[in-house]
Amino acid sequence: MGGRIVVNISTSANWRRRPVGIVRVEREVTKAIFQHRSEAVVPVYLDVPRGRWMTVKDGCFGDIMSDAWVSSDNPDHDAADVRKHLKPFSPAATDSFVTVGSDWSFQVPDRVEQLYGNHRVLIPALYDLIPLLFPEYAPGMEFYDQFNHHYRAVQRLAKAVFSISETSAVSLREFWESRGLAATAPPVKVVPLAAPVLPAEAPFLDAKERAILEDVEKDGPFIIYVSTIEPRKNHQLLLDIWRELYAERGERCPKLVVVGMRGWGSNDLIRTMERMNAGRAGKIVWREGVSDVLLMQLYSRSTFAVFPSYFEGWGLAASEAAAVGKVCVISTAGALIEATRGLMPSYHPLDFPGWKNEIMRLLDDPAYRTSVESSLTIDAFKRTWQDFGNDFCAKLLDL
Amino acid sequence: MMMLDDEQFIHACFKIILGREADPNGFAHYLDLLKKKKNRSQVISDLCYSPEVTESLLPFEILAAVRRYRSSRLFRLSLKRRVPKPQPATPLEGQPAGASLGPDARREHAHAEQVRLNEALLERLGALQQDVSHLQYSVANASRAPKDILGDGTMRYLFNLSTSNHWRRHAVGIVRVERELGKYLSRFGNIDFVIWDSHGRSLKTLLPYQVSKILSDEWCANGSVGQSFPGAQLSEAAIKAGDIYISVGLDWDHAPTGQLVEYLARFGAKAVLACYDTVPVQFPEFLVRDELGQEFRQHLVEMGHGASEVMAISQSTKRDLVHFWEEAGLERRLPDVFTISLASYASPSQLPVLNAHEHQILRDVFGRGDYILYVSSVESRKNHKMVFDIWRDLWLERGVDCPQFVHVGMAGWGNTDLLGRVPRMPAYIGGKINWLQHVSDDLLAHLYHNCAFTIFPSLYEGWGLAATESLAFGKVCVVSNNSSLEEATQGLMPRYHPLDFIGWKREIERLLDDDGYRKSLEQKISDEHRSVSWADFGARFCDQLVLGKN
């Protein structure tokens, strides 16, 4: 690929908080491409109100990619600064256009088509097709329409598609097949996401983080679930299990530590979590805004992790647990088995007896738990963002 | 006025009482009521006690309309006897009578007079309604045989009708149990019916016509908007040592147990109370109000301290209640707990006639294909979520051949998120999830009769009437294997842990696809299921009360 590599960094430019999910991927992809071919990179920003692409000036591009950018004290205000550092963008015939943000909501393929016509310049991302497969697990029906439109346009305009898992790739191929679009569809290349590596030295935790850790650990073993709280993540299964565990074990009931932001459609669940007997007794605790460092400590000090989601395009939290040598009981749905290489105990996300028995066995039978832990080849799960970026460039850019 | 035909009568009532033309819905409702019940005094009563009358000042025109219709014999008789002579207008405070008033003061004066007239009219209308009810009761009971006596006649019983007195809507659950038991007990001469007067903190005796009125079907008829009988206007019950007070209603709302047992203790009377479930203490997350858990805990503790006997509606509820008392560490001998299974409301021998609207609903249900029924309010404890999860898979696997899931019941609380996302499910969009609300007993009977089978996957039940009803209609009901549902289905039905998605799905698929299996379970119901009527329930309760057995 000899031409310019135009990289859409709009999501990163607009985000000044801790980078997770899609934001993190966009930042890492951008860094990798820049490292790979810095001279060819043209960072662009979609000026949505005016419907035009703008080039981000070099200084600002550097700022956006810096760690300081995602630790703003005033994230809502600071994001607007980007607009002062834009200049007009002109397309070139040999461009490749990499865009891996929440593009379905901004008609990105259509806006790229306005610049390049029907030339296949686009290199978009595929995280999952959940709004098409399970519309009830998206916040609104408009996401179904957006995804339906977006991945039809991707079929028409992409030169290749970056997918975070084989599971998602299969979903997309089936989608095109069901719409009669498979014959002219672009290739879908799978590049698994990274999993953070536990640092060799004891990490620095500030006083607040140490207090959280002590509070979590003080009553004995705990089990961790790291995920945004929203219906698809199936926290309800865990609350149902903890209802019974607390009724059966009382004070000997282990603690469930839920780490994640409050998502959409979760008010009733959070209310339940706070009011049920197990919640009132401190056997279910919820922590938001946990730093990466604290999160890795929570993983490594937990008894084991759980991930009962209804569907995942990948399942980063499961591979994170594995990377620190912890068992993660996962759901059989979506890409979780793929993300954990088939090494973790897995159950249908609604198989309550299966989940409960597995959780009790891992709690009560240390030998069993150790045997599962020892079967994990931890190194296989250690995948840095550098590894991810290199793979991305090799599979998507060096075609 | 009584010479008018039904339609004219309804129009006249609206004009006299509400001062307006009858709206189409109201007209249709009362016309239907008159066709079914032929009870014109019910129409007058409902309109007199409607919020439109009781919650707003009657405009002058209405008063004028009432006066115009005074020539009606019914009103003339009543008003002649009760209307006080017109009083001179009360002078405004600070002004001598006859002093000249400014325009504002005159308006205020006129308004005050209007209010006084309204109140006088309401009082007169209320008195008139009571006269009519009393008269009806006297006529209806003139030729009735003397009442039976419960036991050997040496005991006197007081039955608490407070919940029914307050309940003017379709009666379900606990309200229905109180009403059915009240009806059964009303045959006995040594049972007095009482209500708890929360202001006077005392039991007040209901007059016979009031008991008859409260226990009538019209009291809870759909659209009934009347008020309850105020305790303050009744006489305090004369309670003697050894009297037995019975209360099976929503005591935590209408007859606080702590106050009641303290009151009864002053007379040396005993209390027989009821426990339907212990949900609020076991599952605080299922409560609509946070403080309800503590209130209910207090209710159960006071019951343990003050009741002589407690009726539990299932062995499961009895177990949970005794367990609660043990955990609470009550320092006294616990009350005896007896269990009586609830009856079924269903009367499947003859399906009722439906109106046009109900027919339309039924046609719509039939148009979507075979269906599986779940009758329950939609709240977290009832576990609709698992059923929606099953239907997600059934739709994926079967497409348009997916059966229909019909769930009947009110929207409860705590399900906003769930109910918000269900309409986005492909199974819902495909017409295979069908939610019916405000379903009448008549329509419900048809829905039971025509369903493939029913399900009841609740996380916890004190009894489970919908499961009993299903069996009364000869329909298989898959139930949860915890709490009371096994008892409610007499151990005859397939049962699973309420969260065993895989077990439930497999059972539902088998019942759908294996006619022989489903028919074998229906045959089992036919051969082995013993229906319990409300008369049976009442008789067992009385046996327990008098003989200590049921």
Image (cartoon, coloured by chain):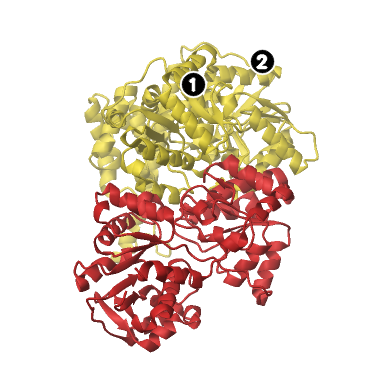
User: What amino acid does circle 1 point to?
Assistant: Leu
Q: Residues within 10 Å of mark 2 (few under 14, many from 20)?
A: some
Q: Residue at x 36, y 66 (%)?
A: A102
Asked if badges 1 and 2 are on one and the same chain, I answer: yes
Of residues B120 and A184, which is closer to you in this image? A184
Residue corresponding to mark 2: B151
Left/right placement of residue A223 relative to residue A58 reads right
- Does the rendering let one see residue B119? yes
Q: Residue at x 54, y 26 (%)?
A: B494
Chain B as rendered: colour: yellow
Q: How many marks?
A: 2
Chain identity of mark 2: B
Of residues B316 and A235, which is closer to you in this image? A235
Which comes sooner in the sequence, label 1 or label 2?
A: 2
Left/right placement of residue A117 relative to residue B504 reads left
Label 1: state its secondary structure: helix
User: What amino acid does circle 2 point to?
Assistant: Gly
Residue corresponding to mark 1: B471
Q: Which chain is red?
A: A
Q: Residue at x 69, y 51 (%)?
A: A371
Left/right placement of residue A280 relative to residue B142 reads right
Label 2: state its secondary structure: loop
